[in-house]
Amino acid sequence: MLAVALGLAYAAVAVLVSAGVFDRIDSYAAWHLMPGLHVRHDPSSLLDDLLPHHGSGFSVGDAIRLPAGFLVSALLVVCAAAYLWRRGRRWAAWAWLALFAVACAVEVMCKGLLTRPSIDVPVRGSVVPISGFDSSYPSGHLLRAAVLAALAAYLWSAWTPAALAWLAVVAVTLEVDGRHTPSDLLGAALLASCLIASTLGVLGGDAPVVSGTAPGAAAYPVPSARDG
């Protein structure tokens, strides 16, 4: 039920974004909350789309968000799935791989279908429209960061505070660096929550693979002499 409600909320926000309902909020953020905003007039390359790197400089925010780039996050999810497979959690391995694939597919589909009016931002004393946010819903980096944070908590419960802290920093830097608008971040949070809730529901509320010990430590009971 929770996953359905979150999915409906995501769809509703998508419709509102396309209709321009969030334009005033997003414009305010672009004017006042994005000191790192860069107005890009040149089309991005494939490398720009795959890696969390924009322009010739590499900021602290880019470094923080590096694990949430498509290529890096895909590699991390595959490695985690392999670890789950080795620990006998094969259904969980497939479930997390499917979650990541669906998340990326929905992101690409929405960015290809949804558009919004251009946002006007101040540049060198004048106001110019920026088209970089026209098809930026939802934020792929925040979406993948949320998946990685949830996966880390599933693998090892002790990672949960650090994973949530990193996720929060990713969201803040995406806003401050001018990579995404508040509506993009809201959409990513709703979509990620929907997919994660669905996955955990399918897994039946499995306990973390490892609780309170390093992931490489044995999580199975030690056989006794009575076990034969």
Image (cartoon, rainbow, N blue to C red):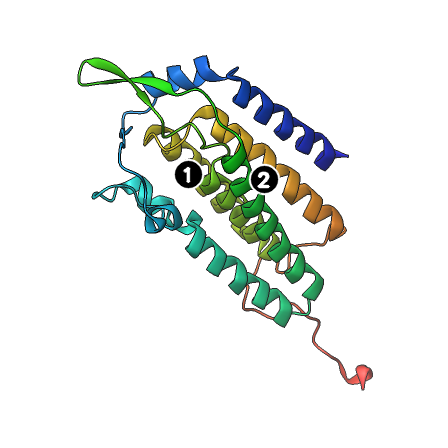
Number of labels in the image equals 2
On residue 19, the disc is none
* Residue 52: image location, x then y, percent: 36, 46
- Neighbourhood count class around disc 1 (C-alpha, 10 Å): few under 14, some 14–19, many 20 upward: many
Which quadrant holds the N terminus? top right
Left-right relation of 73 to 28: right
* Residue 62: image location, x then y, percent: 32, 43
* Marks 1 & 2, CB-CB < 8 Å contact: no
On residue 170, the disc is 1
Q: Earlier in the sequence, mark 1 or mark 2?
A: 1
Local SS, label 1: helix
Local SS, label 2: helix
Residue 3 lies in quadrant? top right
**Of 136 and 30, the residue lying toward us:** 136
The residue at the point 60 percent across, 57 percent down is 97
Residue 9 in sight: yes
The residue at which mark 2 appears reads as 192
Residue 96 lies in quadrant? bottom right
Give, as a three-letter code, the residue at label 2: Ala
The residue at the point 57 percent across, 20 percent down is 16
- For residue 103, above or below residue 190: below
Which quadrant holds the C terminus? bottom right
Left-right relation of 29 to 75: left
- Neighbourhood count class around disc 2 (C-alpha, 10 Å): few under 14, some 14–19, many 20 upward: many
* Residue 45: image location, x then y, percent: 32, 47
The residue at the point 34 percent across, 29 percent down is 176
**Of 154 and 227, the residue lying toward us:** 154
Q: Which is more foreground, mark 1 or mark 2?
A: 2
Q: CA distance from mark 1 to mark 2?
A: 14 Å
